[in-house]
C-alpha cells in the first residue's frame, strides 16, 4: 500500500487524502526510522511537515522485497517520507516544496560499490604523481623532474588499467628522467629506471625473492626495470627515503578528496573502501568533516598485511598485525551514516593483471621470469601473499574482537584456503550475523568450498566488470572451462551464496558492471560462460541493497523505501527494458545523496577498449 511516515497521522490534510486515494497496484515495504510531522498549518504560513522536494512522473524502481515500481518520491530532512503514485505523493506537497518532473526517466537507489580504492598519495598509493595513460608518461615525468633536484626520487603511480599490459621499461624511464631514480607502481607491478635499480643494488645476477615476486628480465637476462608483486617491489621501496613519499597534510587531504569526487557522476552514493591503512585514518576523517556533504558515504576496510607483501618473517608479521589491530580501540560499525569502519582486509594471493592469482591447478601456458628472461612454466600456480599459518591467527583475533572480515582471494586456491580458515574460526567461535565476505572469487572454487560458504553465510563480494576487463589477462593464464566460467555469478547464487557488486576501483561505473554481469561479454566482444549471467533486476539488487546488507546498512540504504536515506540515481534510459547490450551506455543524469543533488548532467562512464598486447 502507499506509505508515508506514520507519525504524520495528525495531519488532517494527509488523513483526508488517505481516505480518498485508491491503493496502488505495487507493494512497498520499508523500515520507518525517521519522523516527519505533517501538521495542519494556518493559511499563508509554511507547512513545517511538508516535504522538501518531490520527484514525480518517473519510473521509480524501489528494489524493495517485491522489486516494486512507483512514480514519485517525497524527501524531507534527507530521508524518504513517501513513495507512491504521482497523485498520492503530490498531495503531500506544499507551496514551498520543490517539485521535480523526472520526465519519465528511471530512478533507482544510489549504487553502492563494494570495492573501491582511494588514497592520500605517497609511495604506497598509485594516486601520487599519477600518470593517466602511456601517452602522458613523458610530459608528467618531465614536469616532475624539472621540479626536484637531480638525484632525488620520483615516486608515483601508473593508472590502471592502461599500463598493466605493457609497463614502461628502465630504458624508457632513463630516456625521460636519467638523473632521478624513478619508481612507478601499478598495483601488482612496478616500473623503475636504471638509477633506481642501482640504488637498490639490483643487478642482472640478483635472484628473485624466495617468497614470491619476480625481477622481470629481458631475453638476454638483463633486468628490464619491471618488478612483479610486493616481495620484488620491496627491494626498491626499502631504499626510498621516507621523505620521498611524504606529502604535506593538506595535499594528502586534497588527493583523497579528488579520488572520491568521481563517484557521484557514476551514480555511486556509497563506497566500501577496500583497504585503508591505520596511519591514514585521520586524513579520511578530516576530509569527511570538511567535505562529507559532497562525497559518497564511505565504509572503510582496515588493511592488515601479515604476510610476504609486507614482511620476510611471518612470525613478526602476525605479531605486528595483531598488535596493530588491538591498538585501534574500535571495531566494525564504529562511526556514523557518512563515515564508518567496516571489515578487516587482507590479501591472500596475487592479482589477475600480472597474472599471479593462486590457482589449485597449474596455469595454461603461464610465463615466468628468471635470470635468463621469460619462460613457459606449466606448473606455475600463482602467488600466496598470506599463507594459512598467518591468516588464521590474525583472522581469529579479529573475529574474536568483533571485527567483520573481508578477504581478497582471486584464484580458486586462495578462495579454498580462505573459506577453510573462516569455517574453522566460526566453528571455534560461533557468532551470529558476522557477515564475513570474500572479495573477487574469480575462478570457481571446489564444490565443498561453495558449500561451506553457503553454510557459514559467507558473502561473495564480486566485481562483475572483471568479466569484461580482465578477460585479456585471464587468456594468459587459463583456458577451457576455467576461462568460460571466470568471475562466476550464477554458480554462487545456485549454492545459496549472497552476492554484492563493485568495481575494484577500475575506471568502470556500475552500469558497465551490470552490463557485464548480464551479457558476460569480454573486452574482445565474446561471451564467456553465458550460463553464469544474471538478470538486470538481480544485478541492480547486488549493486544496491546487497552491498548495503554486506556492510550492515540494509535498514538505511539500498532501496527506495520510507524511512531510508534519500540516496538516489536518475538514469537517462530505462535499464529494465533497454536492450541489455546497451546498458553500459545508459547515461547517469542525476545523483542525490542525503536528499541533495550532488551531480546533474549526462555522464556515460568510458570503457577501456585497447586491444591486448604481449607482455
Image (cartoon, rainbow, N blue to C red):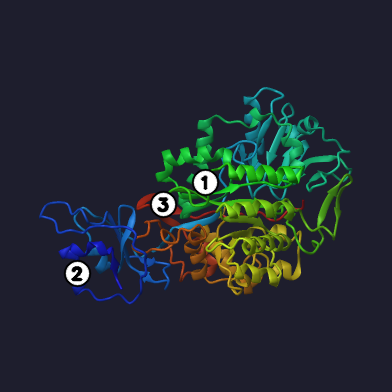
Report crowding for label 1: few under 14, some 14 to 19, many 20 or more residues within 10 A (C-alpha).
some
Regarding residue 372, the answer to whether it shows in the image is: yes
Seen in the picture, residue 285 relative to 382 is either above or below; the reply is: above
Q: Nearer the viewer, mark 3 or mark 1?
A: 1
Q: CA distance from mark 1 to mark 2?
A: 48 Å
Callout count: 3
Q: Position of residue 383 (x, y in %)?
A: 76, 53
Q: Nearer the viewer, residue 180 or 526?
A: 180
Seen in the picture, residue 380 relative to 575 is either above or below; the reply is: above
**Outermost residue to the top:** 149
Q: CA distance from mark 3 to mark 1?
A: 40 Å
The local secondary structure at tag 2 comes to: helix
Q: Position of residue 609 (x, y in %)?
A: 63, 56
Does residue 309 appear to the left or right of 333 in the view shown?
right
Report crowding for label 2: few under 14, some 14 to 19, many 20 or more residues within 10 A (C-alpha).
some
Q: What residue is disc 2 on? A: 17
Q: What residue is disc 1 on? A: 330
Dots 1, 2 in contact, CB < 8 A:
no
Q: What residue is disc 3 on? A: 601
Seen in the picture, residue 75 relative to 250 is either above or below; the reply is: below
Q: Position of residue 257 (x, y in %)?
A: 49, 40
Dots 3, 1 in contact, CB < 8 A:
no
Amino acid at each position: 500500500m502507499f506509505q508515508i511516515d506514520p507519525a504524520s497521522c495528525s495531519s488532517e490534510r494527509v488523513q483526508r487524502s488517505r481516505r480518498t486515494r485508491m491503493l496502488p497496484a505495487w507493494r512497498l515495504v520499508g523500515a520507518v526510522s525517521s519522523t516527519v510531522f505533517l501538521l495542519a498549518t494556518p493559511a499563508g504560513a509554511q507547512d513545517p511537515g511538508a516535504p522538501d522536494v518531490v520527484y514525480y512522473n518517473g519510473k521509480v524502481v524501489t528494489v524493495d522485497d517485491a522489486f516494486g515500481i512507483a512514480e514519485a518520491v517525497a524527501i524531507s530532512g534527507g530521508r524518504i517520507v513517501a513513495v507512491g503514485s504521482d497523485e498520492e505523493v503530490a498531495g503531500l506537497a506544499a507551496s514551498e516544496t520543490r517539485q521535480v518532473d523526472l520526465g519519465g526517466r528511471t530512478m533507482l537507489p544510489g549504487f553502492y560499490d563494494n570495492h573501491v580504492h582511494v588514497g592520500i598519495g605517497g609511495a604506497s598509493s598509485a594516486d601520487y604523481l599519477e600518470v593517466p595513460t602511456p601517452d602522458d608518461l613523458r610530459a608528467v615525468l618531465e614536469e616532475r623532474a624539472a621540479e626536484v633536484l637531480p638525484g632525488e626520487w620520483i615516486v608515483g603511480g601508473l593508472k590502471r588499467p592502461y599500463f598493466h599490459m605493457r609497463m614502461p621499461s628502465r630504458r624508457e624511464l632513463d630516456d625521460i628522467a636519467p638523473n632521478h631514480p624513478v619508481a612507478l607502481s601499478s598495483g601488482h607491478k612496478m616500473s623503475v629506471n636504471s638509477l633506481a635499480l642501482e640504488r637498490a643494488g639490483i643487478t642482472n645476477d640478483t635472484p628473485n625473492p624466495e617468497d614470491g615476486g619476480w625481477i622481470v628480465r629481458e631475453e638476454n637476462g638483463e633486468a628490464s626495470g619491471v618488478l612483479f608483486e610486493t616481495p620484488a617491489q620491496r627491494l626498491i621501496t626499502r631504499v626510498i627515503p621516507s621523505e620521498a613519499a611524504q606529502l604535506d597534510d593538506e595535499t594528502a587531504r586534497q588527493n583523497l578528496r579528488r579520488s572520491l569526487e568521481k563517484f557521484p557522476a557514476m551514480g555511486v552514493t556509497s563506497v566500501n573502501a577496500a583497504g585503508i591503512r591505520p596511519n591514514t585514518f585521520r586524513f579520511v576523517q578530516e576530509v569527511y568533516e570538511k567535505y562529507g556533504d559532497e562525497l559518497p558515504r564511505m565504509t572503510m576496510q582496515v588493511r592488515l598485511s601479515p604476510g610476504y607483501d609486507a614482511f620476510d618473517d611471518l612470525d613478526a608479521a602476525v605479531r605486528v598485525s595483531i598488535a596493530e589491530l588491538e591498538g585501534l580501540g574500535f571495531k566494525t560499525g564504529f562511526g556514523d551514516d557518512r563515515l564508518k569502519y567496516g571489515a578487516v582486509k587482507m590479501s591472500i594471493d596475487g592479482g589477475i593483471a600480472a597474472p599471479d592469482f593462486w590457482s589449485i591447478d597449474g596455469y595454461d601456458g603461464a610465463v615466468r621470469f628468471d635470470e635468463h628472461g621469460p619462460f613457459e612454466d606449466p606448473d606455475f600456480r600463482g602467488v600466496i601473499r598470506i599463507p594459512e599459518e598467518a591468516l588464521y591467527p590474525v583472522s581469529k583475533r579479529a573475529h574474536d574482537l568483533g571485527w567483520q572480515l573481508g578477504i581478497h582471494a582471486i584464484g580458486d586456491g586462495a578462495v579454498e584456503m580462505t573459506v577453510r580458515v573462516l569455517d574453522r574460526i566460526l566453528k571455534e567461535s560461533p557468532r551470529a550475523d558476522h557477515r564475513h565476505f570474500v572479495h573477487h572469487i574469480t575462478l570457481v572454487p571446489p564444490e565443498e568450498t561453495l558449500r561451506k560458504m553457503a553454510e557459514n553465510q559467507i558473502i561473495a563480494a564480486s566485481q562483475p566488470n572483471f568479466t569484461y576487463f580482465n578477460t585479456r589477462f585471464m587468456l594468459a593464464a587459463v583456458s577451457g572451462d576455467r576461462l568460460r566460467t571466470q568471475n562466476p555469478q550464477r554458480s554462487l547464487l545456485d549454492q545459496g551464496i549472497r552476492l554484492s557488486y563493485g568495481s575494484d576501483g577500475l575506471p568502470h561505473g556500475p552500469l558497465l558492471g551490470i552490463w557485464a554481469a548480464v551479457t558476460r561479454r569480454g573486452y574482445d566482444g565474446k561471451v564467456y560462460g553465458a550460463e553464469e549471467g544474471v538478470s538486470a533486476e538481480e544485478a541492480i539488487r547486488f549493486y544496491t541493497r546487497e552491498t548495503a546488507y554486506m556492510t550492515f546498512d540494509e535498514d538505511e540504504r539500498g532501496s527506495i523505501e520510507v524511512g531510508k536515506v534519500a540516496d538516489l540515481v536518475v538514469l537517462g534510459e530505462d535499464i529494465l527494458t533497454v536492450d541489455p547490450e546497451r546498458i553500459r551506455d545508459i547515461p547517469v543524469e542525476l545523483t542525490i545523496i542525503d536528499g541533495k543533488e550532488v551531480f546533474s548532467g549526462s555522464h556515460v562512464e568510458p570503457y577501456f577498449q585497447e586491444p591486448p598486447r604481449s607482455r
